[in-house]
């Protein structure tokens, strides 16, 4: 079977080696005589899988014992509510940097639960760039500053992060976690839906400083308290066992690639392959993001007109390319090149883009 050139924005490509290993263990995980989906989440077999995923993530990201690693459900969207529920007190203000649709949604949820303000925004520029660090304004006693490190719809990404001092820095890293080396110690909370770089949909990773986890928020529903999950090793209720198993395999694969530093080098190479085609096309392909804010995970671009965009997407589909449609907010095209997308697939897309331009250069106007 020929694998598709999968450029979906999420759920997204998984490493082929991970899928093959999961397939080989599908009916009999660790000689248990059962599929991972049939294991009790209280069994020693599942406990080993669960803790391996946690240990590997801490190793790959350099997460110290000052942090708790949680495996939750509800996606990043539930974290939009859990963050202010757990961290925003009545006498404080939460600050949000708006760089795209997801940061805007997070901000709107926070406003339902307490006082939240915009610390900076690039909305007036249709989110074509990340704001400068010196343009971010928030109170010195803010409950936290929230950023979205990569913006899938608009194709922008933070290249450096704010130094917030005593104000906790909270980051939604759903679409670029594990893609580049970061200093976890700069952040108080990192959260990420798994369905882009970590595994399949269904599990959300939360990395949170232990001193931010309170046992005193008894007014909150039990399942919405971080303490509930921290105190039970994310096993308070039945976790998404299959998703966590696949997460553990993806983390194993990432370690085999040489860790995050090596993955970052590969991601940079992949992004350059496609951005070079855009930059050398003399305006035939036009990137949405400003160059200094370009994402190395989601490459967004438009063609000279809607007719050519439609033709490009139709022909790309015929050639086996999947998921290249741009979001309606931006239009055009989007290539999501998460960790699992091979270099060869990016080379194939670049080749197709060049051929399409050559064949249509005379009709671009």
Image (cartoon, rainbow, N blue to C red):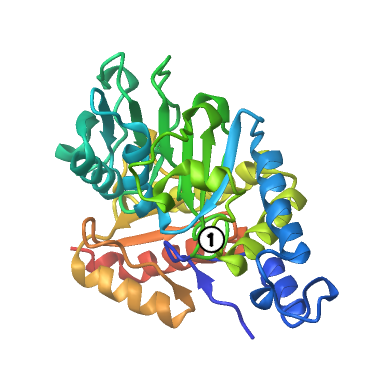
Q: Nearer the viewer, residue 334 or 228?
A: 228
Image quadrant for the N terminus? Answer: bottom right
Image quadrant for the C terminus? Answer: bottom left
Query: Residue 44's quadrant in the figure?
Result: bottom right
Q: Going by the image, does 222 lie left or right of 20?
A: left
Note whether residue 43 is visible. Answer: yes
Q: Going by the image, does 169 lie left or right of 186?
A: left
Residue 343 position (above or below residue 206): below
Q: Residue at x 19, y 43 (%)?
A: 112
Image location of residue 310, percent across then percent down: 26, 73
Q: Secondary structure at mark 1?
A: loop
Q: Residue at x 40, y 18 (%)?
A: 164
Image location of residue 218, percent across then percent down: 38, 41
Q: Nearer the viewer, residue 24 or 210?
A: 210
| Circle count | 1
Note whether residue 183 is visible. Answer: no
Q: Which residue is mark 1?
A: 237
Query: Residue 136's quadrant in the figure?
Result: top left
Q: Nearer the viewer, residue 360 or 18?
A: 18
Residue 30 position (above or below residue 87): below
Image location of residue 347, percent across then percent down: 56, 61
Q: Residue at x 24, y 44 (%)?
A: 104
Q: Residue furthest bottom?
A: 1
Q: Residue furthest right?
A: 31
Q: Going by the image, does 132 lie left or right of 298?
A: left
Residue 251 position (above or below residue 200): above
């Amino acid at each position: 079977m020929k694998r598709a050139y999968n450029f979906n924005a999420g759920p997204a490509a998984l490493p082929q080696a991970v899928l093959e290993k999961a397939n080989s263990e599908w009916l009999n995980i660790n000689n248990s005589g059962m599929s991972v989906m049939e294991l009790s989440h209280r069994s020693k077999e599942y406990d080993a899988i669960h803790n391996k995923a946690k240990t590997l993530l801490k190793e790959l990201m350099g997460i110290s014992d000052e942090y708790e690693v949680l495996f939750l459900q509800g996606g990043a969207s539930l974290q939009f509510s859990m963050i202010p529920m757990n961290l925003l007190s009545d006498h404080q203000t939460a600050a949000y940097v708006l760089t795209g649709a997801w940061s805007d949604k997070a901000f709107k949820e926070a406003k339902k639960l307490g006082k939240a303000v915009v610390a900076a925004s690039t909305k007036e520029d249709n989110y074509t760039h990340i704001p400068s660090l010196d343009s971010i304004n928030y109170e010195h006693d803010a409950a936290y500053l929230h950023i979205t490190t990569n913006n899938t719809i608009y194709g922008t990404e933070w290249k450096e992060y704010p130094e917030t001092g005593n104000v906790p820095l909270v980051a939604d890293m759903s679409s670029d976690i594990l893609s580049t080396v970061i200093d976890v110690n700069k952040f108080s909370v990192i959260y990420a839906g798994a369905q882009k770089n970590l595994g399949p949909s269904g599990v959300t990773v939360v990395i949170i400083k232990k001193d931010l986890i309170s046992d005193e928020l008894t007014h909150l529903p039990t399942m919405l308290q971080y303490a509930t999950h921290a105190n039970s090793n994310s096993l308070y209720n039945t976790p998404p066992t299959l998703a966590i198993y696949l997460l553990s395999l993806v983390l194993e694969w990432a370690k085999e690639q040489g860790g995050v530093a090596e993955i970052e080098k590969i991601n940079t190479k992949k992004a350059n392959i496609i951005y070079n085609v855009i930059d050398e096309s003399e305006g035939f392909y036009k990137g949405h993001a400003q160059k200094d804010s370009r994402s190395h995970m989601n490459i967004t671009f438009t063609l000279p007109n809607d007719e050519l965009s439609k033709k490009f997407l139709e022909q790309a589909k015929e050639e086996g390319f999947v998921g290249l449609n741009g979001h309606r907010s931006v239009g055009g095209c989007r290539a999501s090149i998460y960790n699992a997308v091979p270099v060869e697939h990016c080379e194939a897309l670049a080749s197709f883009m060049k051929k399409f331009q050559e064949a249509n250069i005379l009709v671009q106007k």
